[in-house]
Image (cartoon, rainbow, N blue to C red):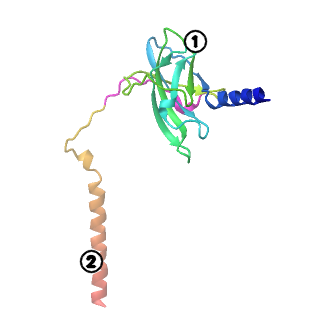
Amino acid sequence: MKKFIFLLFLFKCNFLFCSEKIDISFEYPDIKGDFYVAGTVFFPPSSILSSDNIAVMDTATKKEVPSRITVSEKWPDSSILSAEIIFPANTGKKTAYAIFYGKEIKRGKIFSEPAVLPTVAFFTGSTGRTAENIDVSVGQINVRVDKSISIRYWWYVLPLMVLIFFTVCRSLTISRRYKSE
């Protein structure tokens, strides 16, 4: 009986102190080279209290991938509800990634300032890709600001002056009527 209770205790401790895994799915872009994979992940209540307990790992080698994790929302018990995660990937070596989280996970590889690279949205589990996360490259945008004193920038002044003129004329007409009566 004592052995059974001890095994039950070990089994329970194993569930208390094991990490959880969330598989990441994304489509590799048509470009060659580096790009970023970004998305939002939701966690159950009381599962993690710090972003240091979340890590992105290569599922084949179990090596940690540098990531930037920003907590978006928290549960009422101050545990993390959702987090925005961004990490680098490369089209040269297609790799399967997963997010591991739990009390025994300690994130070691962090990057703070990402470079200017294309970004691909990931989705977790069997959910589909959302339309609002599609990154479309439009190329360079040139903006010219002209601060000249041209009449086309003052077009609204003429209608305002006409309205003010008619308002003043009407008020003078009305005041003359009342004075004459």
The residue that disc 2 covers is 172
Q: In the image, what residue occupies the spot 26% across and 55% down?
A: 157
The residue that disc 1 covers is 60
The image shows residue 171 at horizontal and vertical percentages of 30, 76
Q: Nearer the viewer, residue 13 or 4?
A: 4
Q: Amino acid at mark 2?
A: Leu
Callout 2: SS: helix
- Residue 176 placement, left or right of 80: left
Q: Which of marks 1 and 2 precedes in the sequence? A: 1
Callout 1: SS: loop
- Return the residue found at the far left: 149
Mark linked to residue 140: none
Q: Nearer the viewer, residue 90 or 171?
A: 90
Q: In the image, what residue occupies the spot 54% across and 41% down?
A: 79
Residue range in magenta is: 129-142
Q: Is 99 included in the stretch rendered in magenta? A: no
Callout 1 environment at 10 Å: few (<14), some (14 to 19), or many (20+)?
Answer: few
Q: Quadrant of residue 1?
A: top right
Q: In the image, what residue occupies the spot 55% across and 36% down?
A: 48
The image shows residue 140 at horizontal and vertical percentages of 35, 24
